[in-house]
Image (cartoon, grey):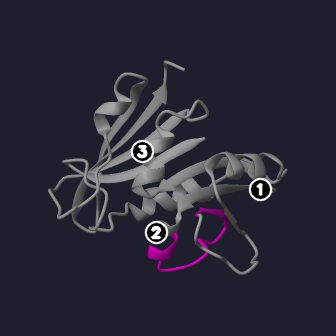
């Protein structure tokens, strides 16, 4: 399982609707095998914030205790992360799993034993955010293996990859 987070330089992830669209789409859509697809797991608020639902070319899994979704292709609604992982492991066409938010789910998954990689995009700005990602929490259990400066639509950012070193 992987975690994708975009935050401002202070770790802010909420309210500003931060997205590193090019990197996000590449990570969550590309597979090594053409007969496979990736899955994205998200909370209800993230689902509701999407401009396009479901995200195309991916299995969308929404974790919510209150949301009722009509049955649709490539969409699954479950109550817990464990239920989502169990359902996805039973699907033979899923290659990789990405947790994409929101804040509660992202913060909870940091300690999950199945989390192997964190893809962190740090936007070079301080934005008006009301929810934060604890960047310092990944320092003890993860090692940074990549840090690349990038720009999207004139916005400077740092693309970072961390892998788990302490199970």
What are the residue bounds of the magenta stretch?
47-64
Residue at 37% from the left image edge and 63% from the top image edge:
19
The answer to which of marks 2 and 3 sits earlier in the sequence is 2
C-alpha span from label 3 to label 1? 32 Å
Q: Which residue corresponds to mark 3?
A: 107
Q: Residue 63 colored magenta?
A: yes
Q: Nearer the viewer, mark 2 or mark 1?
A: 2
Q: Nearer the viewer, residue 132 or 121?
A: 132
Badge 3: residue crowd in 10 Å (few <14, some 14–19, many ≥20)? some
Dot 2: within a 10 Å radius of its alpha carbon, few (fewer than 14), some, or many (20 or more) residues? some
Rendering coords of residue 86 (x, y %): 75, 46
Mark 1: few/some/many CA within 10 Å (<14, 14-19, 20+): few
**Residue at 78% of width from left, 45% of height from top?**
89
Q: Circle 1 sits on which residue?
A: 34
As drawn, the residue found furthest toward the front would be 66
Name of the residue lying farthest toward the top: 166
Residues at discs 2 and 3 in contact (Cβ within 8 Å): no
Q: Which of marks 2 and 1 is nearer the N terminus?
A: 1
**Which quarter of the figure is the C terminus placed in?**
top right
Please tell me which of labels 3 and 1 falls first in the chain. Answer: 1
Q: Quadrant of residue 40?
A: bottom right
Q: Quadrant of residue 123?
A: bottom left
**How many numbered marks have been drawn onto this rendered protein structure?**
3
Residue designated by label 2: 45
Does residue 67 appear left or right of residue 16 in this picture?
Answer: right
Q: Which residue is drawn at 31% across and 40% down?
A: 134
């Amino acid at each position: 399982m992987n975690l994708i987070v975009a935050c401002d330089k202070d770790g802010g992830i909420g309210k500003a609707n931060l997205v590193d669209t090019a990197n996000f789409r590449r990570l969550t859509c590309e597979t090594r095998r053409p007969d496979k697809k990736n899955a994205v797991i998200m909370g209800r608020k993230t689902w509701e914030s999407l401009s396009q639902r479901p995200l195309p070319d991916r299995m969308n899994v929404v974790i919510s205790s209150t949301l009722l979704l009509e049955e649709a292709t490539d969409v699954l609604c479950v109550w817990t992360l464990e239920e989502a992982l169990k359902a996805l492991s039973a699907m033979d066409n899923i290659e990789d799993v990405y947790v994409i938010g929101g804040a509660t789910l992202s913060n909870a998954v940091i300690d999950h034993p199945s989390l192997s990689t964190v893809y962190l995009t740090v936007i070079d700005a301080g934005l008006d955010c009301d929810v934060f990602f604890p960047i310092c929490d990944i320092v003890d259990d993860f090692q940074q293996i990549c840090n690349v400066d990038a720009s999207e639509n004139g916005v400077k950012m740092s693309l970072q990859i961390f892998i788990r070193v302490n199970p």
